Amino acid sequence: MNLGLGIDTGGTYTDAVIMDLEDGSIIDSNKSLTTYPDLIKGIINSIDGLKAEYLANVRFTSVSTTLATNTTLEDKGYPAGLILIGYNISRKIPTDHILSIEGGHDADGNEAEPLGNLKNVKDFVTMNQRKVSSFAVSSYFGVRNPEHELMIKEMIQELTDLPVVCGHELSMELGAYERTLTALLNAQLIPVIDQFIRSVRSVMQDKNINSVLMMMRCDGSLVRIEEALKKPVESIFSGPAASLLGAAHLAGLKECLTIDVGGTSTDISMILDGMPAISSSGAVVGDWDTMVKAIKMNTSAIGGDSHVWMKEKAHIGPNRVIPLCLCATEFPSIVRKLQNAEKISSRIMNDIIQPTTFFISNGAKSHSLPTSELEVEEMEIFDAITDEPSSISDIASKTNKHALMFEGILRKLIQKRYVKQVGFTPTDVLHVTGAYTRWDSSASMLGASILSEYTSMEPFDLCAKLKEDVAREIVLNLIAHCADKVKKTDLEKILSGTELMKFTIKTPVVMVGAPVAPYLKDMKYFIDADIRLPQYHEVGNAVGALVGNVVYREEVLIRPAGSGSSQYLLFSEKGRQMFDDYQGALDMANSLVNSTVSEYMSGYGLSMDNVRFDLECNNIGSIGTVPLETKIVGVAVGSPKGVI
């Protein structure tokens, strides 16, 4: 038998499937809880649920994960240092460790000004190397000439062993802010994906699974695991891309919309003619606009584990917490704590200070995390949190501090992964309504009862309303994805209006994730659509990880060397080249695209005779018969499973 093993590690569940690679049928599957901070346990639990005789015949393994997406959505990326060359950024950027120096190039790749004081770089790296896990470097017009980025990268590598990411390595597109953000997020995600891949490799070795190991990128393509480690930001929508391909495969459709309801987020995307619809711009994750080529997707921070909290009204998300019902299965004491929960003034309530929130040490007290990195005030609060759930009043009692005095510190401890937060979630809502009862419903009932005291509603009615709110949010994002020219706020007004306008979606909609079935009835109240729930929908992501292709995209740009110049410049990932005439530059561009694509695909055992190759040449403007700008893009698609 020629079998494939698909593994998907999400925010809540780790899924595994066995697929017959000859006909694409699923012959075994299993789900287990994702385990933090030790992912290995969750992966082992998922694989242990598969039949051993199938594992012995696995020849191809592919993985996907939402870890990068969730990490970015929840602002929990590892700290990274950022060095800007030739410019500053006034917009929001997710790091406090920033240095800006002189340098950079112009649009033609000519040096705009010499590289700045390198002593400042040395001091910055030396001062921050114990505070960050990696460095990102972005130079002004670095995609037109990466010389300054490479010089600074080499210098950093001489000073530290930490990973260094350059902006030009990830995108050839212009846009200083977006390119910088992409490089920074990539640097922050390196430890996250590295831990995931190490975990997968460890389990494969332990289970004697001797197979090719690949990972899904956010455009729905597959890459060898070594390549995925170099560019973890490209896995930022790995899970959603896998769910899109998996949904289409399970439903037997070449064209469909997919709704993937996970623990942290709900993702909506589309497949056309068997290929994922790719965003014309970069992937957008929460508030961050990147330059990562990804499936066209609408994502919202609402999922089964989204925190439901009270502040004048009920809020859902954006942060993920451990559901009360799930926590109670491991810590039955939480039920007693909920029974004796102290009422908190609504005036001071926020997503941390809630009567239904609890906090648990994330293993740092044994050996997993170095507590020496905590500040004195952080250590004081951390010492008050045990391996059992601690409420806000528990922490206040142990520290003799008011909740407002340590709320910010708790938030930091959660962000740094020293503490896990427990709270009421949509999963608890389903336990109250009886739509899904896998865990301890009594904890969910108590949580609903406590929160309902801050409203004029009965617990069951509150949960019915919250369930409807989740369904409405899913539908809103589905419509927004389809009607991307219409403002989401306007669509929201229509959905929330007194006179309901029912939207119609003509393309089949396939739902994956667990549990999604309870939301179907509420969704159909808002929308007229062919919504399908295929067999194995609950492990759709793991299925999708196995059905992707190797896809490689090479892009080059040709421009005049300057105003009035008869020479032409060619820009590619290999750097800048000068030519005496346009035809010479065009010939080299075509040769470069073809040779680079061929070399890449041969690395996967694929000859150009066995791949689909499309070459596009787009011209912008002209001077006589010569274009002002020419962009040549080559895209090759091939199946790695055919050469196993």
Image (spheres, rainbow, N blue to C red):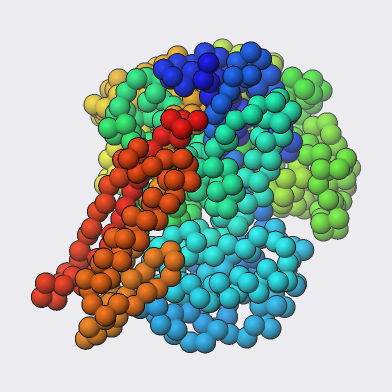
- Residue at screen point 58% across, 35% down: 213
Which residue occupies 65% across, 40% down? 196
On screen, residue 398 versus residue 183, left or right, reads right
| Residue 482 locus on image (x, y percent) | 29, 37
Image x and y of residue 325, in percent:
68, 22
Q: Do we see residue 619 in this rendering?
A: yes
Query: Does 251 sit above or below residue 157?
Result: above
Q: Position of residue 292 (x, y in %)?
A: 44, 52
Instruction: Give the residue at x 50% y 48%.
Output: 234
Q: Is 140 left, or right, of 17 in this rendering?
A: left
Give the number of marks: 0
Judging depth in this view, the residue of 174 and 547 nearest the camera is 547
475 above or below 618?
above
Name the quadrant containing residue 16.
top right
Task: Write down the quadrant of residue 157 in the picture.
Answer: bottom right
What residue appears at the point 67 percent right and 30 percent down from the top-left corner? 204
Q: Is residue 57 above or below residue 609?
A: above
Is residue 107 placed above or below 227 in the rendered structure?
A: below
Q: Nearer the viewer, residue 385 or 550?
A: 550
Q: Tell whether 265 sits left or right of 203.
A: left
Asked if one can make out residue 396 in the rendered structure from this viewpoint, the answer is no
Image coordinates for residue 427, horizontal then vertical, percent: 58, 24
Q: Nearer the viewer, residue 115 or 416?
A: 115
The quadrant holding residue 358 is top right
